[in-house]
Amino acid sequence: MSQPPCLLKFETRADEVRTSLSAIRHIGSHLWLGCDETATLERLTYRGDHADDHHHFAIADYLHLPSSSDEEIDIEGIAYSDYYLWFVGSHSLKRKSYKPEKTPADNLKRLRKIERQENRYTLGRIPLVNGQLYPFCSHPKNPDITLTAAQLKRRKTGNELTKQLEHDRYLGDFLKANIPGKDNGLDIEGLAFNGDRLLLGLRGPVLRGWAVLLELQLVEDKPGMLKLQKIGDKQQPYIRHFLNLNGLGIRDLCPWNNTLLVLAGPTMALDGPLQVFSIPFADLKTDQRLHHPSLAIELPETSGGNRAEGLTLLESSTEEILVVYDAPTSPRLQKTGAVSADRFLLPKTDIGLG
Protein backbone atom coordinates (compact mmCIF):
# COMPACT_ATOMS: atom_id res chain seq x y z
CA MET A 1 0.00 0.00 0.00
CA SER A 2 1.40 3.36 -1.06
CA GLN A 3 2.00 6.02 1.61
CA PRO A 4 2.65 9.77 1.27
CA PRO A 5 6.02 10.28 -0.48
CA CYS A 6 9.24 11.46 1.13
CA LEU A 7 11.01 14.48 -0.40
CA LEU A 8 14.80 14.08 -0.58
CA LYS A 9 16.56 17.45 -0.57
CA PHE A 10 20.13 17.58 -1.94
CA GLU A 11 22.58 20.47 -2.12
CA THR A 12 26.02 19.41 -3.38
CA ARG A 13 25.87 18.32 -7.06
CA ALA A 14 22.12 18.04 -6.52
CA ASP A 15 21.02 17.64 -10.14
CA GLU A 16 23.53 14.86 -10.75
CA VAL A 17 22.74 13.03 -7.51
CA ARG A 18 18.96 13.19 -7.50
CA THR A 19 18.66 11.85 -11.08
CA SER A 20 20.89 8.79 -10.56
CA LEU A 21 19.97 7.34 -7.14
CA SER A 22 20.69 3.61 -7.10
CA ALA A 23 21.14 2.52 -3.45
CA ILE A 24 19.77 3.49 -0.04
CA ARG A 25 19.91 2.38 3.59
CA HIS A 26 18.26 3.90 6.68
CA ILE A 27 20.75 3.85 9.58
CA GLY A 28 19.85 5.62 12.82
CA SER A 29 18.60 9.10 12.01
CA HIS A 30 20.13 9.15 8.53
CA LEU A 31 19.50 7.95 5.01
CA TRP A 32 22.69 6.87 3.24
CA LEU A 33 22.47 6.89 -0.55
CA GLY A 34 24.60 5.94 -3.52
CA CYS A 35 24.43 7.01 -7.17
CA ASP A 36 25.35 5.26 -10.38
CA GLU A 37 27.05 8.36 -11.82
CA THR A 38 29.42 9.28 -8.97
CA ALA A 39 32.16 7.97 -6.69
CA THR A 40 30.53 9.39 -3.58
CA LEU A 41 28.12 8.58 -0.76
CA GLU A 42 25.32 10.92 0.26
CA ARG A 43 23.86 11.40 3.76
CA LEU A 44 20.50 12.96 4.57
CA THR A 45 18.73 13.35 7.90
CA TYR A 46 15.40 11.53 7.75
CA ARG A 47 12.39 13.45 9.10
CA GLY A 48 9.44 11.38 7.89
CA ASP A 49 7.87 13.36 5.07
CA HIS A 50 11.24 14.72 3.98
CA ALA A 51 15.00 14.28 4.39
CA ASP A 52 17.53 17.13 4.28
CA ASP A 53 20.83 18.38 5.80
CA HIS A 54 22.78 16.90 2.89
CA HIS A 55 26.39 15.78 3.40
CA HIS A 56 28.52 14.58 0.49
CA PHE A 57 31.38 12.08 1.06
CA ALA A 58 34.06 11.25 -1.54
CA ILE A 59 35.00 7.57 -1.25
CA ALA A 60 38.54 8.39 -2.39
CA ASP A 61 39.00 10.12 0.98
CA TYR A 62 38.73 6.71 2.68
CA LEU A 63 39.85 4.12 0.13
CA HIS A 64 42.41 4.04 -2.67
CA LEU A 65 40.62 3.85 -6.01
CA PRO A 66 42.37 2.53 -9.12
CA SER A 67 41.13 5.42 -11.27
CA SER A 68 40.39 9.09 -10.80
CA SER A 69 37.79 10.02 -8.18
CA ASP A 70 35.92 11.67 -11.06
CA GLU A 71 35.28 8.23 -12.55
CA GLU A 72 32.06 6.68 -11.26
CA ILE A 73 31.96 3.67 -8.95
CA ASP A 74 28.37 3.04 -10.01
CA ILE A 75 27.31 2.29 -6.42
CA GLU A 76 24.38 -0.13 -6.54
CA GLY A 77 24.10 -1.46 -2.98
CA ILE A 78 24.61 -0.24 0.60
CA ALA A 79 24.56 -2.30 3.81
CA TYR A 80 25.45 -1.83 7.47
CA SER A 81 26.98 -4.19 10.00
CA ASP A 82 28.87 -3.68 13.28
CA TYR A 83 29.79 0.00 12.76
CA TYR A 84 30.75 -0.47 9.12
CA LEU A 85 28.99 1.04 6.12
CA TRP A 86 29.42 -1.36 3.20
CA PHE A 87 28.90 -0.54 -0.47
CA VAL A 88 29.32 -2.26 -3.82
CA GLY A 89 29.89 -1.05 -7.35
CA SER A 90 28.15 -2.66 -10.29
CA HIS A 91 31.22 -4.68 -11.40
CA SER A 92 29.85 -4.25 -14.92
CA LEU A 93 31.11 -3.27 -18.34
CA LYS A 94 29.44 -0.29 -19.98
CA ARG A 95 28.27 0.05 -23.57
CA LYS A 96 27.97 3.55 -25.00
CA SER A 97 24.32 4.56 -25.29
CA TYR A 98 22.35 5.93 -28.23
CA LYS A 99 22.16 9.75 -28.32
CA PRO A 100 19.32 11.28 -30.35
CA GLU A 101 21.38 14.39 -31.14
CA LYS A 102 24.11 12.25 -32.77
CA THR A 103 24.16 11.18 -36.43
CA PRO A 104 23.27 7.56 -37.32
CA ALA A 105 26.93 6.90 -38.13
CA ASP A 106 28.10 8.28 -34.80
CA ASN A 107 25.48 6.26 -32.91
CA LEU A 108 26.57 3.06 -34.66
CA LYS A 109 30.11 3.76 -33.49
CA ARG A 110 28.83 4.40 -29.96
CA LEU A 111 26.88 1.13 -29.83
CA ARG A 112 29.96 -0.92 -30.66
CA LYS A 113 32.13 0.73 -28.00
CA ILE A 114 32.43 -1.07 -24.65
CA GLU A 115 34.11 0.66 -21.72
CA ARG A 116 35.79 -0.84 -18.68
CA GLN A 117 35.93 1.44 -15.64
CA GLU A 118 37.97 -0.07 -12.82
CA ASN A 119 36.31 2.01 -10.09
CA ARG A 120 33.14 -0.02 -10.73
CA TYR A 121 34.89 -3.10 -9.33
CA THR A 122 34.80 -1.82 -5.76
CA LEU A 123 33.41 -3.75 -2.82
CA GLY A 124 34.33 -1.97 0.37
CA ARG A 125 33.53 -0.84 3.89
CA ILE A 126 34.07 2.41 5.82
CA PRO A 127 33.79 2.83 9.62
CA LEU A 128 30.53 4.56 10.53
CA VAL A 129 30.13 5.83 14.09
CA ASN A 130 27.46 8.27 15.26
CA GLY A 131 26.60 9.21 11.70
CA GLN A 132 30.20 10.02 10.70
CA LEU A 133 32.57 8.18 8.35
CA TYR A 134 36.22 7.62 9.30
CA PRO A 135 39.28 6.14 7.55
CA PHE A 136 39.89 4.35 10.86
CA CYS A 137 38.72 4.70 14.47
CA SER A 138 38.26 2.73 17.68
CA HIS A 139 35.30 0.40 18.00
CA PRO A 140 32.75 2.23 20.22
CA LYS A 141 32.10 -0.84 22.38
CA ASN A 142 35.61 -2.33 22.36
CA PRO A 143 38.44 0.26 22.27
CA ASP A 144 40.98 -2.53 21.72
CA ILE A 145 39.55 -3.05 18.23
CA THR A 146 40.41 -0.60 15.45
CA LEU A 147 37.82 -0.17 12.72
CA THR A 148 39.53 0.32 9.35
CA ALA A 149 38.28 1.24 5.89
CA ALA A 150 39.03 -1.62 3.52
CA GLN A 151 38.11 -3.11 0.16
CA LEU A 152 38.23 -6.45 -1.63
CA LYS A 153 41.63 -7.20 -3.17
CA ARG A 154 42.12 -5.77 -6.63
CA ARG A 155 43.51 -7.52 -9.67
CA LYS A 156 45.03 -5.93 -12.76
CA THR A 157 41.46 -5.83 -14.01
CA GLY A 158 38.53 -6.41 -11.70
CA ASN A 159 39.02 -7.92 -8.25
CA GLU A 160 39.27 -11.24 -6.44
CA LEU A 161 35.56 -11.94 -6.89
CA THR A 162 35.48 -11.37 -10.65
CA LYS A 163 38.61 -13.50 -10.97
CA GLN A 164 36.71 -16.38 -9.34
CA LEU A 165 33.56 -15.73 -11.38
CA GLU A 166 35.49 -16.06 -14.64
CA HIS A 167 35.68 -19.79 -13.90
CA ASP A 168 32.07 -20.16 -12.71
CA ARG A 169 30.12 -22.83 -14.60
CA TYR A 170 27.04 -20.59 -14.83
CA LEU A 171 28.45 -17.07 -14.96
CA GLY A 172 31.95 -17.46 -16.38
CA ASP A 173 31.01 -17.26 -20.05
CA PHE A 174 29.35 -13.88 -19.52
CA LEU A 175 32.57 -12.45 -18.08
CA LYS A 176 34.87 -14.05 -20.65
CA ALA A 177 32.72 -12.71 -23.49
CA ASN A 178 32.89 -9.16 -22.07
CA ILE A 179 29.12 -8.72 -22.11
CA PRO A 180 28.06 -5.31 -20.69
CA GLY A 181 25.76 -5.22 -17.68
CA LYS A 182 22.75 -3.80 -19.48
CA ASP A 183 23.12 -6.49 -22.19
CA ASN A 184 22.44 -9.22 -19.57
CA GLY A 185 26.09 -9.32 -18.54
CA LEU A 186 27.39 -9.25 -14.96
CA ASP A 187 25.74 -6.40 -13.03
CA ILE A 188 25.71 -6.36 -9.21
CA GLU A 189 22.79 -4.31 -7.88
CA GLY A 190 22.05 -5.46 -4.36
CA LEU A 191 23.90 -5.81 -1.05
CA ALA A 192 22.76 -7.12 2.34
CA PHE A 193 24.05 -9.08 5.32
CA ASN A 194 22.86 -12.45 6.59
CA GLY A 195 24.80 -12.85 9.83
CA ASP A 196 28.46 -12.50 8.85
CA ARG A 197 27.74 -13.42 5.23
CA LEU A 198 27.41 -10.86 2.47
CA LEU A 199 24.66 -11.31 -0.11
CA LEU A 200 25.18 -9.82 -3.56
CA GLY A 201 22.17 -9.59 -5.86
CA LEU A 202 22.74 -9.72 -9.60
CA ARG A 203 20.59 -7.70 -11.95
CA GLY A 204 22.25 -9.77 -14.63
CA PRO A 205 22.81 -12.24 -15.92
CA VAL A 206 19.36 -13.77 -15.56
CA LEU A 207 19.56 -17.42 -16.62
CA ARG A 208 16.41 -18.67 -18.34
CA GLY A 209 14.34 -16.51 -16.00
CA TRP A 210 16.33 -17.28 -12.82
CA ALA A 211 18.04 -14.40 -11.00
CA VAL A 212 21.33 -15.03 -9.19
CA LEU A 213 22.20 -14.27 -5.56
CA LEU A 214 25.80 -14.72 -4.40
CA GLU A 215 26.63 -15.49 -0.78
CA LEU A 216 30.17 -14.82 0.40
CA GLN A 217 32.23 -13.93 3.45
CA LEU A 218 35.06 -11.39 3.57
CA VAL A 219 37.88 -11.33 6.11
CA GLU A 220 40.70 -8.87 6.59
CA ASP A 221 43.85 -9.83 4.73
CA LYS A 222 45.88 -6.83 5.85
CA PRO A 223 45.02 -3.25 6.80
CA GLY A 224 42.88 -1.76 4.07
CA MET A 225 42.49 -5.06 2.23
CA LEU A 226 39.84 -7.81 2.34
CA LYS A 227 39.83 -11.29 0.85
CA LEU A 228 37.30 -14.02 0.19
CA GLN A 229 36.94 -16.61 2.94
CA LYS A 230 36.11 -20.13 1.79
CA ILE A 231 32.66 -21.15 3.01
CA GLY A 232 30.25 -24.08 3.00
CA ASP A 233 30.82 -27.81 3.20
CA LYS A 234 32.77 -27.71 -0.05
CA GLN A 235 34.95 -24.81 1.11
CA GLN A 236 34.27 -22.59 -1.89
CA PRO A 237 34.80 -18.83 -2.35
CA TYR A 238 31.04 -18.19 -2.63
CA ILE A 239 27.69 -19.96 -2.80
CA ARG A 240 25.20 -19.44 -5.63
CA HIS A 241 21.46 -19.14 -5.07
CA PHE A 242 18.94 -19.00 -7.94
CA LEU A 243 15.74 -17.02 -7.39
CA ASN A 244 12.52 -17.23 -9.39
CA LEU A 245 11.53 -13.55 -9.64
CA ASN A 246 9.14 -13.89 -12.58
CA GLY A 247 12.02 -13.46 -14.99
CA LEU A 248 13.26 -10.22 -13.43
CA GLY A 249 16.73 -9.34 -12.19
CA ILE A 250 17.68 -8.12 -8.70
CA ARG A 251 17.72 -4.33 -8.25
CA ASP A 252 18.35 -4.21 -4.49
CA LEU A 253 18.32 -6.26 -1.27
CA CYS A 254 17.23 -5.29 2.23
CA PRO A 255 16.93 -7.31 5.48
CA TRP A 256 13.54 -7.35 7.20
CA ASN A 257 14.11 -9.10 10.55
CA ASN A 258 14.31 -12.81 9.62
CA THR A 259 13.51 -12.17 5.96
CA LEU A 260 15.33 -10.82 2.91
CA LEU A 261 13.45 -8.32 0.75
CA VAL A 262 14.35 -8.39 -2.95
CA LEU A 263 13.58 -5.48 -5.26
CA ALA A 264 13.25 -6.85 -8.80
CA GLY A 265 12.98 -5.29 -12.23
CA PRO A 266 14.00 -5.83 -15.86
CA THR A 267 17.64 -6.76 -16.44
CA MET A 268 18.05 -4.45 -19.41
CA ALA A 269 17.20 -0.74 -19.68
CA LEU A 270 13.52 -1.41 -20.29
CA ASP A 271 10.20 -0.37 -18.85
CA GLY A 272 8.46 -3.27 -17.14
CA PRO A 273 7.28 -4.79 -13.87
CA LEU A 274 8.82 -3.59 -10.60
CA GLN A 275 8.19 -5.99 -7.74
CA VAL A 276 9.32 -6.64 -4.17
CA PHE A 277 9.74 -10.27 -3.09
CA SER A 278 10.51 -11.82 0.29
CA ILE A 279 12.43 -14.95 1.22
CA PRO A 280 13.21 -16.19 4.77
CA PHE A 281 16.90 -16.14 5.58
CA ALA A 282 16.48 -19.71 6.85
CA ASP A 283 15.76 -20.84 3.29
CA LEU A 284 19.19 -19.60 2.22
CA LYS A 285 20.87 -21.83 4.80
CA THR A 286 19.52 -25.08 3.37
CA ASP A 287 21.10 -27.23 0.67
CA GLN A 288 18.34 -26.11 -1.70
CA ARG A 289 19.78 -23.60 -4.18
CA LEU A 290 16.61 -23.01 -6.25
CA HIS A 291 14.25 -20.65 -4.45
CA HIS A 292 10.75 -19.33 -5.07
CA PRO A 293 10.44 -16.07 -3.07
CA SER A 294 6.97 -14.75 -2.26
CA LEU A 295 5.66 -11.64 -3.99
CA ALA A 296 5.23 -8.96 -1.29
CA ILE A 297 4.48 -5.75 -3.21
CA GLU A 298 3.68 -4.90 -6.81
CA LEU A 299 5.12 -1.43 -7.44
CA PRO A 300 3.40 0.88 -9.93
CA GLU A 301 4.65 0.33 -13.47
CA THR A 302 6.08 3.38 -15.18
CA SER A 303 7.31 4.29 -18.64
CA GLY A 304 10.16 6.49 -19.79
CA GLY A 305 11.91 6.62 -16.41
CA ASN A 306 11.26 6.14 -12.68
CA ARG A 307 13.29 2.92 -12.55
CA ALA A 308 13.20 1.60 -8.99
CA GLU A 309 16.81 0.90 -7.98
CA GLY A 310 16.99 1.06 -4.18
CA LEU A 311 14.88 0.19 -1.18
CA THR A 312 15.34 0.37 2.57
CA LEU A 313 13.31 -0.58 5.58
CA LEU A 314 12.45 2.53 7.57
CA GLU A 315 13.74 1.76 11.06
CA SER A 316 11.04 3.83 12.74
CA SER A 317 8.30 1.58 11.35
CA THR A 318 9.52 -2.04 10.77
CA GLU A 319 6.67 -2.41 8.26
CA GLU A 320 7.41 0.44 5.87
CA ILE A 321 9.93 0.68 3.04
CA LEU A 322 11.28 3.64 1.10
CA VAL A 323 12.03 3.23 -2.62
CA VAL A 324 14.30 5.52 -4.68
CA TYR A 325 14.44 5.80 -8.46
CA ASP A 326 17.02 6.27 -11.17
CA ALA A 327 16.01 8.48 -14.13
CA PRO A 328 13.12 10.18 -12.29
CA THR A 329 10.51 11.86 -14.49
CA SER A 330 9.79 15.57 -14.08
CA PRO A 331 6.86 15.19 -11.62
CA ARG A 332 9.31 13.72 -9.08
CA LEU A 333 11.63 16.74 -9.34
CA GLN A 334 9.65 18.82 -6.90
CA LYS A 335 11.97 21.81 -6.62
CA THR A 336 15.62 22.74 -7.08
CA GLY A 337 17.77 20.03 -5.51
CA ALA A 338 14.88 17.79 -4.41
CA VAL A 339 13.33 14.55 -5.66
CA SER A 340 10.50 12.47 -4.25
CA ALA A 341 10.87 8.86 -3.08
CA ASP A 342 7.97 6.48 -2.45
CA ARG A 343 6.92 4.85 0.82
CA PHE A 344 5.06 1.54 0.88
CA LEU A 345 3.61 -0.56 3.70
CA LEU A 346 4.72 -4.18 3.75
CA PRO A 347 1.93 -6.79 3.92
CA LYS A 348 0.86 -7.74 7.45
CA THR A 349 1.88 -11.38 7.51
CA ASP A 350 4.07 -13.49 9.74
CA ILE A 351 6.88 -13.12 7.21
CA GLY A 352 9.58 -10.78 8.45
CA LEU A 353 8.58 -10.86 12.10
CA GLY A 354 11.41 -11.71 14.43
Image: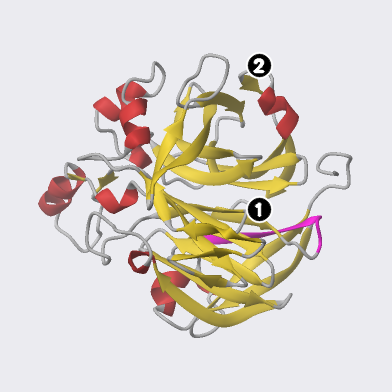
Can residue 263 be seen? Answer: no
> Does 350 appear above or below 230?
below
Q: Is residue 84 left or right of residue 20?
A: right
Instruction: Please tell me which residue lies in front, 20 or 144.
Output: 144
Q: Nearer the viewer, residue 2 or 7?
A: 7
- Three-letter amino acid code at disc 2? Gln
State yes or no: residue 244 in magenta.
no
Near-viewer residue (148 or 207):
148
Residue at 39% of width from left, 72% of height from top? 16
- Which residue, given by chain and number where applicable, does mark 2 sit on? 288
Please report the residue visible at 77 percent of the width from the left and 46 percent of the height from the top: 257
Residue 37 lies left or right of residue 213; in this view the side is: left
* Residue 322 falls inside the magenta stretch: yes
Q: Check the picture and name the quadrant holding the C terminus.
A: top right
Q: Which residues are magenta?
A: 317-325
What is the x, y in percent for residue 38?
A: 36, 64
Q: Main secondary structure of the magenta part?
A: strand
Against 189, residue 140 (above or below) is: below
Q: Is residue 149 left or right of residue 262?
A: left
Foreground mark, 2 or 1? 2
What whole-number distance in Å separates the C-alpha atoms at marks 2 and 1? 32 Å
Question: How dense is the environment of label 1, judged by Cα within 10 Å: few (below 14), some, or many (20 and up)?
Answer: few
Identify the residue position indicated by label 1 in the image: 300
Q: Secondary structure at mark 2?
A: loop
Quadrant of the rendered structure where residue 210 is? top right
In the image, farthest residue toward the front: 144
Return the x and y of residue 100 as percentages of the image width and height: 25, 60
